[in-house]
Amino acid sequence: MSHSYSSQNLRADVVSIIANVESDEAKALELSKKVALKVSEGQLKLVELVICLREYITSPEQIERQHALHCLSTILGELPKHTLLKNDVSVILDFYLGKFDDIYCMKETLYGLSHIVNMKCFYSNQVSSVLKPLKDDYQSTQYLAATRYYAFLVLQHLLEKFRESMSTNLPLNNLFIETFLSIAGGEKDPRNLLISFHLNSAISSALENISQYKEDLFDTLFCYFPITFKPPKNDPYRITNIDLKVALRSAISASPYFEEDAFGNLIDKMTASSPSVKNDTLLTMKACIERFGGEACIKNWVPIWNALKFEIMNNVDADESVTESNEPEFNNYEESLRIITSISAQLLNLKEGAFDKFQSHIFDELEPNFKYEKDLKQSSAILAAVARTNVTSFNKVMDDVLKLFFDNVSDLDVNKLKLLILNLSFFFDAYIEVFSPYSNKAQNKAVPDNKLAQYKDQILMILSKSLKGSSKSEVSLRTLSVVQLTKLVKMPGFLSGEEVSLIVQYLTETILTDDNKNVYFACLEGLKVTSDVSENSVVEISLNQMLKHLEKEGTHTVVLGEEEAVPVERILKVILDFTTSRHKLVVESIIGISNIICHFSKYVEEKEYCFMLVSCLYSLFDNNQEVLTNDVASHLKKSIETELLASSKNVAIYSDDHNLHLISAVFYFLNVNAPQANHQIELDRFLVLFTEDTKVLKSPARSVIIFAKLLSAFDKACKIPGGLLLNESIRLLKVQHEKCSEFEKLAYLELLAVLSNKWCTEDNVNANLDISNTALIDLEIEAWCTKGLAMKNSKLAETYTDKFVKLLGDADIGPASAKLFGVFVMDIPTLDRIKGISWNNNVRLLYKQKLFSDVAPKLVSGYSATSDMSLKANYLLALSLLLKNTPNKITINYIPNLLSLLLQAVQLNNSDVRVSALTTIRGTVNQASQLITEHIHSLIPLLMRLTNPDKHNAYLVRLTALEILRDFTDHVPLNYLLPYKDDIIKGLAVALDDKKRRVRKTCIDTRQAYFELGQVPFE
Amino acid sequence: MSEFINENPDILDENLLPSRKEEEGDAFQDEALNTVNLLRRKRLLKIHQTTACKVYRNVELIDRLKAQEMALDQVPDLTASETEESDEGEPEDPIDAQEIYDMIAHISDPEHPLTLGQLAVVNLPDIEVSESNDKSKISEVLVKITPTITHCSLATLIGLGIRVRLERSLPSRYRITILLKEGSHQSENQVNKQLNDKERVAAACENDQLLGVVSKMLSTCK
Amino acid sequence: MSIKLLKSLKLHKDKLWSVDCSKGLMATASSDRKIKLVNLKNLDFQLVEELDDSTHKKSVRSVSFRPHSSILAAGSFDSTISIWGKDEEASIEDGYQETELLAIIEGHENEVKGVAWSHSGYFLASCSRDKSVWIWEADEMGEEYECLSVLQEHSQDVKHVVWHPAMHLLASSSYDDTVRLWKEDADDWECAAVLNGHEGTVWCSDFEKSESSLRLVSCSDDTTVRVWKYEEEDENGEDIWTLESVLPSVHSRAVYAVSWSPDGYIASVGSDGQIVIYTEDESGKWKVIAKQHEAHSVFEINTVQWTRVGDTNLLITGGDDGCANIWFFIP
């Protein structure tokens, strides 16, 4: 006995392990590890351990026995597999086998055995000694799930370790299977079932002589089918319903020996009414088919086919079930079709003859349907399912089917035509499935010639006929044919380039001339899909055609080939819709439209036309940011900037506020996306252009807006004389603002905002402002500078906002300064943040939050400080302007303090104030109704008044008031609201006669909500 | 694709029912709008389909800022308590047949999961509105309904549903007449007489069970 | 000649269906399930009482005062009739006392649409959607009611019943487009005559207040107002009534009520919101002498009644706006 670890030590450890088995497993485990280590290091002999444990293990107290044995088993578990030598193993094994008669310790015993059998020196000749008692002396039904688990574990370990030796030793092989069968019977516990299923499939796929046991093995599986299981809360093993289903499924499909039993039983289960059972059955059947192989299919496909046919044919409104309710997690219709596909796959792998039998059998059964036009949809779907297996099957099926379709295609009426196309579509899908491997350009294998291709011309003829030949009222037919034409384009190698172009031509003409939504979107989708396949054809045919229309003449509607007038708006809409994020299309449209603008900008009478073009151009940039990479941007800059800049001087643009504004935004887009490296150069170029050539800072010039937008585009790291520019602009405004038009004034003010945000230090700004000034123009200048500062959370901004708050108390300039509060938080595109661009301006994400939390309380106190209603009005106006441009999630926290002001604000004689106050209230109702609930008694009468015609109840006031009343019914507790039900219904009768249709509509909905309020739903 | 196809010719596709073209009017609600701008806003909508797009926001902002700039030095009296009738500036959308149709076309049939519009029980051409522009005078609405089958036992219930919906939705100055379309029903006259007997209708509306059925029919109205 | 609005009383939240006046008191019935009493004496028009509105579960459709008493009968869509009254001894002077519920009369299968007391106060007549007219005999106190007869000749709902001002002669108007006259024969009641001619529901009728002649005016969904005359009794005791005249057509929609004034004027009201007053210049020849448009703004008018307060003739109308309008008519 070695000194380092005395028997005292051992005793101490053992005692404390036993003591902790239940109370503190971790502790027990840790000590067990320690002891195990001693053993493996040879400082302790297993015998010593056993001796030390003997008195407990033999104790009359079953608890003591259990704990002791558990202790020993755990230690064994912690031992490295090779530690115990032959003798130790056999000794300890015999010891454990001896414990089999102690039913109280069965768990610990099996636990131990599960370790022992893993020992290196546990040999195959010992296996049966473990199996026998398990088979004969162990009655699984007597024990708890936890105990039974170890029995399975023992078997699992044995099988993993001795698979080979078993399969070569038939008696052992059989013994093992029998043992498994005896312990697996009647199992209910999910964890044990899981392991049992795994064992079962391992046995049936790896061991010998299965045929003898197949019924029993199968029964121990199928008696659980279809298995469902609701995991309990905090289930330690995290076993899911799916785990069990899958395990069972793969066990059932594990071995071809199960073939007869499996198919027979599954087909019976097909009659189940529950969709989930049916689904499980179908999936299992599919698994079986794929695992059991062709031979099995040959034997069984007839009954399977009949079952499936029944399922498919009686599947009410076939695939609608999916498209309609979004989560019928089972689509048994599709699964059934899938099975048909797998059967044909198996048969084909085996031998073509087998497949032919299958296919012709099905075809013969379905053929009559095509004569009598019944269940056509399903029949086609089935044949398509056979076809989509592979090229061979596809051609075989096409051989039979296409005849049926194209026998008499002459003089089809609309419904027949619809049906034909609809049925064909299934085979188009099949085609795509079969031939998509050939599609990827990488290894462009030519698509093998196929039967469908031979009918290409007829198909194209029918589809184009039903599109071009049908009246516009045939929406569903036209839509259908567009959808299918699109599908043809998607079919790899089916169409020639010319044919694709032809389709693009059709789609283009249709999309420009057909007003129906469905048709429009179908065409749009078609063009998009096509541009994926060949963007060029869309650019060359579709886009160019449209651009040509636009080039014709101005605002007057242009004329298409077939003498149909197409409004310009439509063309531009289409261009915007189908370019989305398609690189080449975007670029080409931008260039195309820019050129057209350059042309028309010269004619004053084309202002309106230019407006449409420019707005479209703007959106092309705005919608396609992700396309506008550096390279694209610089490419565009090269190709259009100079011309556009020139034409921005042209009358139709320069003299028009909108056009000039929007086109300057285009320059913004061009430069903000251009490579940063060139920004300084570009910026300098423009500085010269605007400050020295055109001198926009010397005397008022409309083009300053372009300058402002450009400045906002460039990298803020660029060097520019910010202070100077600011100073000059301010001086210009102060001295010459009478000469400025509103447009120019605003342009310069925007410039100030940009400068003070990007290129001026606080001192720069401060130096150019005089806080004591109260002239209107000074206030405006300060307001806009403050905006620029506030957006970067500058401390200085606060100084000025404070000033404005103070001015609200001033009778003379109070109203004006109140109005300027709108400026601080108003979002101006010039200072928008663009996704992925951080360097063009200093807009802090939370600046509104900061500003609002800083100013709002001051407004509240200022409001309550004065009793003069006309001054109070200033605070309310200021507040409402802040609210208007501050997102609700920010303001919501302040509502409790603001509510009383809001209730005042909605009574001010100013529609805008009322609207923004109402909007805030509405937001509160929807996001934090509890804040409102207590106030509805005062709110409801107010809101009712706001729904009536009155000079200051503008459209939006009336509308929002009604919407709030309606939202009450969703958010305010019934017991609060019910008392008002009748009065609200009566009171809203006025708004039923509102001037505005939409108000009336909303009023009707609101009243409806109250009629139903508290009404018991009738079933 | 199935949503495009409607194999049952008796049912009209929801989005093929007669409907009002995009309610452009709604979008333009700021005072800053002169006619030129209004025209432009309409154009923008035609092209971009939504007022939610940046370009629209832009144009709106320009107009708004300009208006604000002009009004900056004016001091409106925000507090005077007098209220005047809404200014005439706001154009009036008259109540027309389409509006009536929209009120009732989405009522669902008591036995099908379909709307009266889809089943062509109510049809735009069978709605007459005689609107007296003076709101202090009485106006009239006539709706002719076409039951799906000439012996439809539910004709009266459907008619009642329509009447309740209209009485709840129309200003009180409207007199509502609901008739079965000539020859569309065996007992046309009885049904018509019932549907237009105010006393019977009033009584029906106090029958909770009936009212339950009706409000179920109305629950699909949009 | 003209009609002048004296007073408009917003009494109810919903349709006002019916009014009746007696001893300077006006009672109104409404869909809001309330019955209200208004004092007409010296044109005071104050609301004096609101009867317990928990009595009826549905619309109150019709009210009628028992002559020479303050007993009131009210018929409701809940198929019952309620009887109200107060201690006769104590008079208004010494304080006003509560009107109490004296009785609830059940019997009709469904909506009661009309109730009316005979001039004598012995009989109460009621009619209902169940197509029947019931005649009840009431005790002095108005607490006990015995059904004397259930008259079921009408083939559809009976909309309205009215008694002759001096005889035990009852007229009932019906959804079957007819008016039927009923009188006591021995100890039973029987149909004395059927007035055919209207081409739509007959909503209401009223007898001429005169000893010399026996006439009835009726109004209908067919927008006409008609006067019927009693000729004679034929050999087998059937009364013979003939259509004397169709009044000048003014109404453009259903006519819901008519009332024949003691001094010979006929007033009619209806869905088109008009009050029309007719007078007879030579026997059987009627002309319109006064018209009032939008008499209840844009709402329908359901009921009209002449009444006399002191020495002024008043015309009272009730409409869907829940108002009772009181008009002054200068011949």
Image (cartoon, coloured by chain):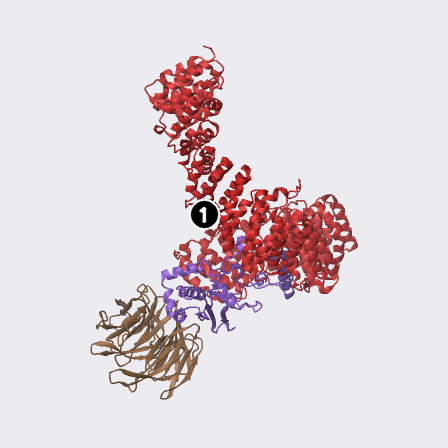
Chain colours: A red, B purple, C brown
Tag 1 secondary structure: helix
Task: Tell me: residue A778, above or below residue A306.
Answer: below
Q: Residue furthest left?
A: C186
Q: Position of residue B189 (x, y in %)?
A: 40, 71
Q: Position of residue A351 (x, y in %)?
A: 54, 38
Quarter of the image containing the C terminus of chain A?
A: bottom left
Q: Between residues C105 and B73, which one lies in front from this camera angle?
A: C105
The subunit letter for the residue under badge 1 reads: A
Count of picture labels:
1
Image quarter of residue C244: bottom left
Q: On the picture, is A340 further left or further right than A633?
A: left
Q: Which residue corresponds to the image point at 61% horizontal and 58% vertical from the top-left? A: A465
Residue with the mark numbered 1: A310
Residue C24 seen:
no
Q: Residue furthest bottom?
A: C282
Q: Position of residue A587 (x, y in %)?
A: 70, 51
Task: Tell me: residue A536, above or below residue C295.
Answer: above
Amino acid at pointer 1: Phe
Q: Position of residue C205 (x, y in %)?
A: 34, 78
